[in-house]
Every structure is written in C-alpha cells, then in structure tokens.
Amino acid sequence: MLTLHAAPLLRTAPDAAPFAGAAVAVRADRIVAVGPLAELTGAYAGARIRRWPGTLGPGLVHDGPLPAADTPRERVHALLRLGVTAVLAGHLTDPALRAAVERSDLLVLPAAAPPTLALGGRADLAVLDADGACLVTVVAGRIAHRRA
C-alpha cells in the first residue's frame, strides 16, 4: 500500500526552505516521490492520504545521550516524541538500550549526518508544529508516535 503524507509545509532538509502544498509518497519503508500533493494524488490514484498540520520533513538525528527514563523502552519513546528517527552509535553502549533502539527501527549512525528526504531513501519523517513540537514521527514508513 502506498501512503501520501501531506502537510501545509514541506521541508526536504533541515536547511532547505519549506514549500507549500507538498507531500511525500511512501511505499513500505521507502520514499517513492516528493512533490506537490495535487501531482502525487494524480500519479498515485487510490493511495491513502494522511494530512498532517504543521511542517513535514525528515526525521531528526539525536546526537547526544538518550533522555533519562525508567526503562530503555521509555528512553526510546522520549526520542520518538521529539521527532527523532536516528541516534548515534556512540550513545548506545548499554546492550538493553541498543536492543530497544533496534526494536523501534531507529537508525543507528556512526556519526551525525543531516537528514534529508530522498527518493529511494528510508521513509523517516517528522511533522513539527509552529513552535517546533513534534506532532508525528514516522520511522521506516510506519507511524511510531502521534501526539493526541
């Protein structure tokens, strides 16, 4: 099944200017298209459309220690609530924490790299409100966090 994630604004990279009326087409865990919503709905008739408020863009990379919490699972969930879809390997020295990160499908990176939305790339997305708070986190094409 193909899903179109659409938002009033879309940013393809952290330093890119946002543009209006755009969407990201996702099949399984991959990005298959990025562009104007009108074009993508025509190209992918019958796709499920998820309309999000705010700015849609690539998931965030967390480049510090994971937030403190009672369990490794809660530490990972704290990241998902921020729009994080990738962490640095150097901060995963605890085997239980690494296992929780792997179960969540977060990317584990050897070094920080700016996230982007790229054709054929993994569908790691975040939707942020005007204040920068995360509304939705999509990890490898599935919704991992959605603010109520």
Image (tube, rainbow, N blue to C red):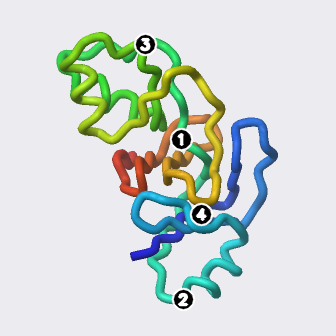
Amino acid bearing label 1: Gly
Picture coordinates of residue 50 (x, y %)?
48, 68
The residue where tag 2 is placed is: 45
Determine whether label 2 and label 3 are within 8 Å by CB: no
Using the image, determine if residue 60 lies above or below residue 71: below
Is the residue marked by circle 1 packed among few (<14), some (14-19), or many (20+) residues within 10 Å?
A: many
| Residue drawn at (70%, 49%) of the image | 11
Amino acid bearing label 2: Ala
Q: CA distance from mark 2 to mark 1?
A: 26 Å
Which callout, 2 or 3, points at the residue further toward the start of the chain? 2
Comparing labels 4 and 3, the label whose residue is closer to the camera: 3
The residue where tag 3 is placed is: 90
| Label placed on residue 24 | 4
Which callout, 1 or 4, points at the residue further toward the start of the chain? 4
Picture coordinates of residue 38 (x, y %)?
69, 80
Front residue (pair 134, 125): 125
